[in-house]
Amino acid sequence: MEHHTGHPQPLSEIVATVYRDIAPHFSRGRVAHYIPALARIDPRHFGISVITCAGEVATAGDSEVPFSIQSVSKVFTLTMALEKLGGRLWHRVGHEPSGSAFNSIVQLEQEKGIPRNPLINAGALAVTDALLGGGEPEALIVRITDFMRGLAADPTVSVDQEVAVSEGDTGFRNASLANFLRASGNLHSAVADVLQVYFNQCALHMNCRQLARAGLYLANAGVDPLNRARITTHTRARRINAIMMTCGHYDASGDVAFRIGLPGKSGVGGGILAIAPGRAAIAVWSPGLNEAGTSLVGQMALERLAALTGWSVF
Amino acid sequence: MEHHTGHPQPLSEIVATVYRDIAPHFSRGRVAHYIPALARIDPRHFGISVITCAGEVATAGDSEVPFSIQSVSKVFTLTMALEKLGGRLWHRVGHEPSGSAFNSIVQLEQEKGIPRNPLINAGALAVTDALLGGGEPEALIVRITDFMRGLAADPTVSVDQEVAVSEGDTGFRNASLANFLRASGNLHSAVADVLQVYFNQCALHMNCRQLARAGLYLANAGVDPLNRARITTHTRARRINAIMMTCGHYDASGDVAFRIGLPGKSGVGGGILAIAPGRAAIAVWSPGLNEAGTSLVGQMALERLAALTGWSVF
Amino acid sequence: MEHHTGHPQPLSEIVATVYRDIAPHFSRGRVAHYIPALARIDPRHFGISVITCAGEVATAGDSEVPFSIQSVSKVFTLTMALEKLGGRLWHRVGHEPSGSAFNSIVQLEQEKGIPRNPLINAGALAVTDALLGGGEPEALIVRITDFMRGLAADPTVSVDQEVAVSEGDTGFRNASLANFLRASGNLHSAVADVLQVYFNQCALHMNCRQLARAGLYLANAGVDPLNRARITTHTRARRINAIMMTCGHYDASGDVAFRIGLPGKSGVGGGILAIAPGRAAIAVWSPGLNEAGTSLVGQMALERLAALTGWSVF
Amino acid sequence: MEHHTGHPQPLSEIVATVYRDIAPHFSRGRVAHYIPALARIDPRHFGISVITCAGEVATAGDSEVPFSIQSVSKVFTLTMALEKLGGRLWHRVGHEPSGSAFNSIVQLEQEKGIPRNPLINAGALAVTDALLGGGEPEALIVRITDFMRGLAADPTVSVDQEVAVSEGDTGFRNASLANFLRASGNLHSAVADVLQVYFNQCALHMNCRQLARAGLYLANAGVDPLNRARITTHTRARRINAIMMTCGHYDASGDVAFRIGLPGKSGVGGGILAIAPGRAAIAVWSPGLNEAGTSLVGQMALERLAALTGWSVF
């Protein structure tokens, strides 16, 4: 497969081609089973939404069907925490790939409670704790939701309470990580409060159109190009993209860089946010996961899109 | 520090600015001490050479002083091995960041002799073995040297025999890795032959001008833009860049992506090759290393250059 | 230092010699600081009690001062669980030394939630869960306390509620382990219930006389030699002793076997129970710990006692 | 299964019973395949020899057929090194169980080149290097062979050259470990010299009668009870026994302590030496190995013998 450079074709045609090429694979992969409320999702769903810095939008499939963004939320809480703490955040969490699975606790023990990066569960829990700062979890959940509504330019974005509670019942691995962080002195609020916020941010319910729109500032130097709001600095936007490139897909991050070449973050709900710096934000969704916990068909769609557009940063 | 986008300034002025800004730091870091022939290098050296896809060259400092490229050679043997084996190479070596030091053997044991990526020592040994294919080590050393001469467009590139022999005397960690690979069935030639080639490729003696020129195909979709020679496919060039981004600086790769945002590969001789895809190849050299084994001043220079040019891929 | 074989000296004289030889070292080591209620203990305490299978008792120092037995309780809950489940217990916990610290979670992740042995924290939590079997934690705490009272032949044995609650406040590492076990399917009761029992069993408050008496069945083939009660089978008593020998002192178990040569179990309260099979049970107590979390002076006393009695099993 | 205490039965009858009970299992397990010269051994062999401190001998099966003692040799080189270096040996090798496989290199990296104990391959290589001390490998091989002839009271003990050379061809994992030790500064002689001695000591060719006789000093406080030669001090004999108990069967040492309760050391040739302190030395041999690399039928025989004699130290 050879790549095109540039995209003489209209974006809508490219997205239609991606959809057509990927369609035979719909329903492949395995729906996340360890969160009951997610296990019932129909695996045949597939949605894609691309929005350029110029505001052009192209979508296909179930781009209006909301799904649980799960770990994709880590990108947005990271942005909030960088705005709140600046570089001090890096005393509590690293920015190196972990070489381990998303919920590994081994690295945490070996490195004395400093998670390798903010996109693995342990790191995201530390980030959420940094945002919480001993405050009320409910208030932070509202702040995160409002932040997402603003970014998505859509006030209907909300948390799926059934999923949030479902997480709460089954999230023993996350409770293990949070208690470990607390034992290491790297979690300052009550464990239950941090977990409450974390389970709620993971349960944000968004569709591909909303998610791509929400991530657009990362493609545009930290500024929402459509309403000119500065979300973060150019440097921070670049750094968030860098972290997504090296760490966004857990122990398969190298493979995604290798195949697709775009910074991105996946969630076990089947959603992936990818950024083409200077060009566009892309959200894909398909519930069936590969072994690394990333949407199998979603990743295929991104690989095809990157090939057709030449948007790989490499 | 804010980044410029684009570079209205002439490249030569930018490089001069980088040199001037970095000069106060010359001689910082610690010269590699475990290879005797390298331990004697004057730590005050600093060189930089930038070459664009259009052939523009800008240099500063000791850009004509040759140094031992060491692990930077892994990028070039990887290119050769991909041309020889294609995708079959990935049965023998992964393309994921390791989360470990450059010479770690832990990961190798846990993953049954398949090195995480071709830019750590174990992976590079497997790549060299793939190139050797049971043949004569001397012949492969000649082939690698010729490949580098062609890429650098300079027939004077050669191996520093003193360094090659010096490696041979002290390279017990590499001998340990090679024997481990052999025990795992992932090294087919004689251990001593693979090590001989490996120590010679690491001892390639090049200056910044030559090294930047040699890497230019990676900035130009696999084709040398100055003589139109296709070195590798566009897809492979992208993938090599992706691997450099996620794995090029061992357990500090995430930090380099975060600070600089360019694919690159460092060597303990103090050299770094960085690629700005579509734009330029950059070689910097300064012998003092940081804790991760990468040139401390060289990395500062790249960070400054990336800030001034806006060449970060993110 | 040469060892005597047999002990022509009366036991009381030997114990007096041990006390005199060890006295210059009283208050060495570091009192456990991570459980507030234990951090206040006077480090100068030292007690020893030896009871033979024939019922001879020799004591010295603070042998009547109660202390928190902490992890020594794991030996007794292991005995109870073996009586309840028999060999099925070994499906949930191994009997191999871990090579890791007492509260390590690394091994647990690598071996999919099966703790290496019942004398590290993770293993003891699985054992307590096996005893709990979904029942009421209060009822199990009563059962454990009654079991200890029976073994010690002393109805005054009880749980120090302040210590139990103190554990509850600071035991985040144990909460992390328990949640990890639950996530791995190797904890069936509610995490909070298991932790409640665990913190209470660790807070059992006993003196050296009571503790030595309680362990006497392990020196006598599973039968209390003084009241002829069979506590466990001969085979199980041997196996518990074997586990104490290979795993009783976490990552210093080999050193204790090497220096002392008796099966034993230490707790961070400074107590150690040691068994001389066929001969005697020994309890020592001194609050200052060595780096491995075992009573520093207590271990010296056992080494001296073993040398003077020739009781080493080796 | 209940254990007898003491052995009213004559030893010869007990050994005959063990043989009869174990016979149905002959040829179970898997012969070591990675040393070609061992892979051809008939798996149906079984031999046992017991020798008491009083000089009583009982044998059954192929007790006169020589086999390759392999790692059992580590016990004897450890004895030699303790006599040569005394406690200084423990600066170069620990005495803790490793929790890892016999040839693991992970622990070595994590603990900076200090092997956990002298009975894993890395530790035995350091011990052999300590004995070699930069001298001639041939001379040390002669010294080791002479030591074994003296212990076995049999001048015909010798090294099987075919096995020694066979090791030399396939021992890449050991070459990896030795090079790693050298890189860590914990191997002072030439790697090839240490490996030469190591492969020769492993290739010692002995039968059960000779091996049990050779180990008898460990059952008798360091003194050969039949010729009154002091081989080592009482304390060192105890410590060697302690190390065999906690570390003698790699990551199955706990299970052997649990089932058999005697210090012992196994080799991949199918031999096991076990010590009943104060009573007897036992050698068993059967080539088929279990998953931990220990003789499957040999271990069954020891478990049966321990049950019938009550010789468990626990």
Image (cartoon, coloured by chain):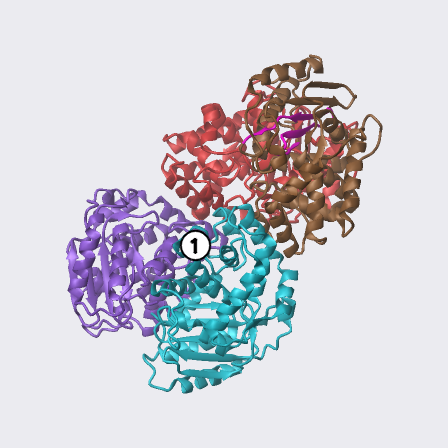
Chain colours: A purple, B cyan, C red, D brown
Quarter of the view holding residue D22: top right
Left of C36 or right of it: where is B232?
left
Q: Considering depth in this image, is A117 or D12 the residue closer to the camera?
A: D12
Q: Secondary structure at mark 1?
A: helix
Q: Considering depth in this image, is A24 or C307 the residue closer to the camera?
A: A24
Q: Which stretch appears magenta?
A: D264-290
Q: Amino acid at mark 1?
A: Leu
- Residue plotted at (64% across, 69% down): B162
Residue C301, horizontal then vertical, whole percent:
69, 39
Q: Is residue C263 magenta?
A: no
> Which residue corresponds to mark 1?
B89
Left of C312 or right of it: where is B232?
left
Secondary structure predominantly adopted by residues drawn in magenta: strand
Residue C296 visible at all: no
Category of crowding for the residue at label 1, using alpha-carbon neighbours closer than 10 angstroms: few (below 14), some (14–19), many (at least 20) = some
- Vertically, is A80 above or below D299? below
- Residue plotted at (37% across, 77% down): B53
- Vertically, is B229 above or below C162? below
Left of A168 or right of it: where is B105?
right
User: Which subunit holds the residue at mark 1?
Assistant: B
Q: Considering depth in this image, is C265 or A11 the residue closer to the camera?
A: A11
Q: Considering depth in this image, is B169 or B204 the residue closer to the camera?
A: B204
